[in-house]
Amino acid sequence: MVVKKVCPYCKCSFNSRKNAKVFCRKRCAELAKKRVLKENKSHMCQWCAKKFRSPEYRRKFCSESCRCNFVTSVMVMHCKKRKRPVKRSLEEVIRCSREAGLSYGVYVGINGID
Ligand SMILES: [Zn+2]
Ligand SMILES: [Zn+2]
């Protein structure tokens, strides 16, 4: 059985004996594959170090949850640096949570009160 098909790469129509054939010639299949690889740039997730592909040039994280984890950990690190060995006063905890852009409750939930 001969089927009429349109090559998705060069848009020419061709007759194929096999249903599985997608491109008109091998070269089109190779070029199409290369183009997909080029468009989807390779990135490494800055949180879980997983490699992923995305056409977004600036993308740093493989998923939204990785992005959230990263942002939270940076905030915690930022506050820990400032942590003094003495017990922090309530005012200080509130100040630090404000600096981290978190509400007092959320901040204490992450860091606890020392
Ligand atoms: Zn073709
Ligand atoms: Zn990730």
Image (cartoon, rainbow, N blue to C red):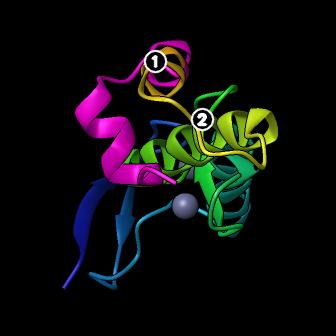
The secondary element bearing badge 1 is classed as: helix
Residues rendered magenta in the picture: 96-114
Q: Say left or right for 38 vs 109.
A: right
Residue 74 vs residue 2, the one in the foreground: 74
The amino acid beneath tag 2 is: Met
- Say above or below: 84 vs 32: above
Q: Nearer the viewer, mark 2 or mark 1?
A: 1
Q: Is residue 104 magenta?
A: yes
Q: What residue sits 81% from the left and 39% below the top?
A: 81
Residue 109, position as x, y percentages in the image: 31, 50
Mark 2 Cβ inside 8 Å of ligand 2: no
Where is mark 2, residue-wise? 75
Q: What residue sits 40% from the left and 51% below the top?
A: 110
Cα gap from disc 2 to disc 1, whole angstroms? 18 Å
Density class for disc 2 (Cα within 10 Å; few <14, some 14-19, many ≥20) is: some
Residue 67 visible within the image = yes
Residue 43, position as x, y percentages in the image: 73, 50
Residue 9 vs residue 35, the one in the foreground: 35
